[in-house]
Image: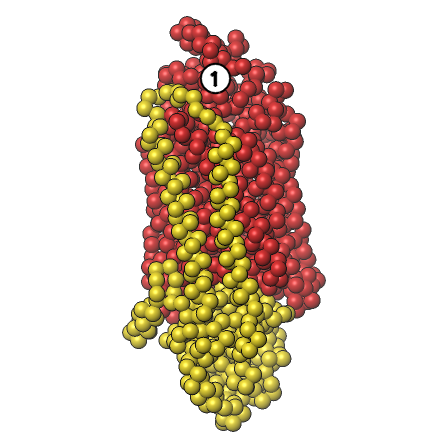
Chain colours: A red, B yellow
Amino acid sequence: MTPSTNTLERTNYLNATKGFMSWFWTIDHKRLGLMYMWSVIAAFILGGFFALKIRMTLMPGAVDFANQTAEQMNAYNNAFTVHGAVMIFLVIIPSIPAALGNFVVPIMLGAKDVAFPRLNRFSYHLWIIGALLFTGTFFIGNLDTGWTFYPPYSTGSTDNTVILATLGAFILGFSSIFTGLNFIVTIHKMRPANMTWFRMPLFLWAIYATAVIQILATPVIGISLLLLLVEKTMSIGIFNPELGGDPVFFQHLFWFYSHPAVYIMILPGMGVMSELFATFSRKPIFGYKSIAMSSLAIALFSFIVWGHHMFLSGQSQLMSVIFSALTFSVAVPSAIKVFNWIATMYKGSVAFTTPMIYGMSIIWLFGIGGLTGLFLATLGTDVQFHDTYFVVAHFHYVMVGSALFGFIGGIYYWWPKMYGRMADNAMTKLAWLLAFIGFNLTFLPQFVGGSRGMPRRYAGYGTEAGYDSFNYWSTIGAMILAVGLTMALGTLIYSMFRGRKAPSNPWGGVTLEWQTPTPPPEHNFEIDAFPVGDPYDMNLCEYKGEEEGFLPVNPRADDPCVADVAIDPVYFEPESENAPA
Amino acid sequence: MNLSALLRAAAWLQQDGDYFFPVEASTNAGEVDRIYYFIFWVSAVSFALIVGATIYFAIKYRRTKVGMNPEDSPHHSTSIEIVWSVIPTLFMIVMFKWGFDDYVDRRTPPGDAYQVNVHSQKWSWSYSYDEGPETGMGWLGGEGEGLVVPVNVPIKLRIDSADVLHSFSVPAFRIKMDAVPGRYTYAWFEATKVGEYPVFCTEYCGTRHSRMLSKVQVLSQEDFDAWMKAQGNLADLPPVEAGQKLFQRKCASCHNMDGTKLIGPALNGLYGKEESLVGGAKVTVDDNYIRDSILEPSAQIVEGYPDAMTPFAGQLSEDEISWLITYIKSVK
């Protein structure tokens, strides 16, 4: 039986129009969100393939160190470059903002769409063009600069795939800028009349802070990549000392974007965390204002810490010292968020649903990712760890362990809203368990390898170097991780066709996206305006059974989620003491 | 992997002091490790607290009945929020200060430090001394001397690069510094234990980045003096031997003398042979061809090989080029 607030058998945004063009040329933010999501997943599979290639090459015994050929090394160098570039530019940066953000932000605001729907479609098409340019490098050469494109190697030494790849990154940058611009305008101009800034769900705060970074930082990478192209194609000396340029200058420009970009990746994940912890503890988020403000603080500080990537680059000592001190300043707001999420669980009613399990495991993963950042902010220890696997493990804990797990947790959380079916069962939890174990097994040994000096971006390590055991466990872990993530994808695809039909509000969230039928109608809502109160006042809705999910305690007469079930008077027992103020 | 190399590897590992770090072989290593363990224990305790609290709350306050609403509890507390912002900040101030002091020490070589110049290029390290000798790459258990230094003497390294970015890393000394083309960078250390320690390139530099390995040989002062005396001058050797030494130092990371292909072609038996070049031209290997290939390699690329060699123009004297040619001619 279909739950009464489920629209799968009625008209909804998924079935309102049909055909390839109705998706490809859509301006519906929900459809664009879904297309981003599946495109990002496809790119993730590509990047994951190269990750496995890296791990297989490094498995002790897989390649004879003494007789590794230049071709094998080039293939490895290509693998880590493509892995990094695809995962960063095509996967993590657009993952939560462009996929989940597009789907959720307008509905959370009670709006029909983003402020500029056509610009939104244009962003997605730019993403496709960027992705095609990246994949184009496979056909014309061997992209092997690392995702950082450092000159003079990239401009003076390697082949012309760099031109295609930097052009791709440049175009993806515009995709990111337009998405950010759209969200800023949408959040500023399209909030319902009584949704003040401090009544916004924290996911919106996180997306807002992210968007600020996107539009301020991304143009800098755009111009840097253009300068790189100018040097590469016209031999105008900008970065290459042979032509009178300065290679350290590129590093400054590159990290002026790429460090804030780390927060483009992690802030939206933090936003998802705040939603998960509130909903699944059935409690208002602890310290709402400090979470909201810490998002802005992180966005601000993220612009003044780039030099910690360059402690050993030859930049002045004074700069290194200042950047070290500033770097610690980012750690404080990040820590505050973690404490707030944990405090939200205190005296709550914690549900072990799949999204919440992802959320709770991120405390572990981000705990490790964040705390190991302290070793890298500290000058004395960074000298030892710089450009070793310690750094590799650290940023994977942040970008995969936190940002990507946040993305997956967010997909499971909003999945019922997207497809009208549940994906929360033993299999989804087993997939999480495998991914969690695999992830830790992959990256924990890398910290120790790194502190023992194991350098990054090496196509092989002789047994003499003493790193075989770390590589062995890492590769085993990567295989388990791959099985877990594949299984997670399988559970989602299974749910699309066979999952239990979902009510409009299966989890008990009180933000606006849970107050419209599931999946939502084409224009998100069947009614015009909502009374907006505290986004985390969980007493506004209550559980009515598996079929109906959670329903408003005091529904409006025209609330479509309630209208269907209103026949049963038992749902309207007066509980006015819980009514919203 | 032969047995002797394995034994060497085992011997090297046995020197190792603890789980997280290779042996502490410089005056600076102990301090870095102390900072590490301070941050490590602060982090470990914080991690145990946050994960412990998460697990404890998750179990204690787990939802036993679907839809169960919790009792009201505070969702904001200024005093708690101030406490948990200030305490981490205090710890971080200590971390910063300690790391800063160590870093400034690391960047400031003592005035009486003994200088060795470190040269990097794709894909080899070489080291030159003011007294004259120059040494080549070397790797654990392999040929080549690497960087030879006396124990208990501060050593200042002046690092340069002939092509792209590289980075000079000696984990056992806890030092690392980028080599930047077009300028000098500096690092210093004082080794405390006689022995051999691996050197890695830690800034990605292309195909053979993972083979840009070397070693530091730390000798007692007497052994070092004796070594220095024995170095002599390449010019005093017969040209073939001088050429061979130079070849080991400068060329062997990309060219073999046993007929196998590394990055570039093997150079044995090459003299007098005809080579096909990219673009279709043919050339007979003679003295001038070898000379041109050393000084301006990109001009004549042999078919089937990448244009990857760093030009040696300005790096080698006329005598040195001539010794190399003599040596290459001599190997059949």
| Quarter where residue A55 is shown | bottom left
**Residue on which disc 1 sits:** A540
Whether A272 is drawn above or below B258: the answer is: above
Whether A209 is drawn above or below B95: the answer is: above
Secondary structure beneath disc 1?
helix
Determine if residue B323 is in view.
yes
| Quarter where residue B139 is shown | bottom left
Question: How many numbered callouts?
Answer: 1
Mark 1 residue type: Leu
The image position of residue B94, as x and y in percent, is 50, 52
Q: Residue at x 60, y 80 (%)?
A: B315
Quadrant in the picture for the N terminus of chain B: bottom left
Chain under numbered label 1: A
| Quarter where residue B220 is shown | bottom left
Q: Residue at x 36, y 69 (%)?
A: A464
Q: Residues within 10 Å of mark 1 (few under 14, many from 20)?
A: many
The image position of residue A447, as x and y in percent, is 41, 55
Q: Residue at x 57, y 25 (%)?
A: A199
Q: Nearer the viewer, residue B236 or B242?
A: B236
Q: Residue at x 59, y 75 (%)?
A: B311
Determine if residue A547 is in view.
no
The image position of residue A10, as x and y in percent, is 48, 17
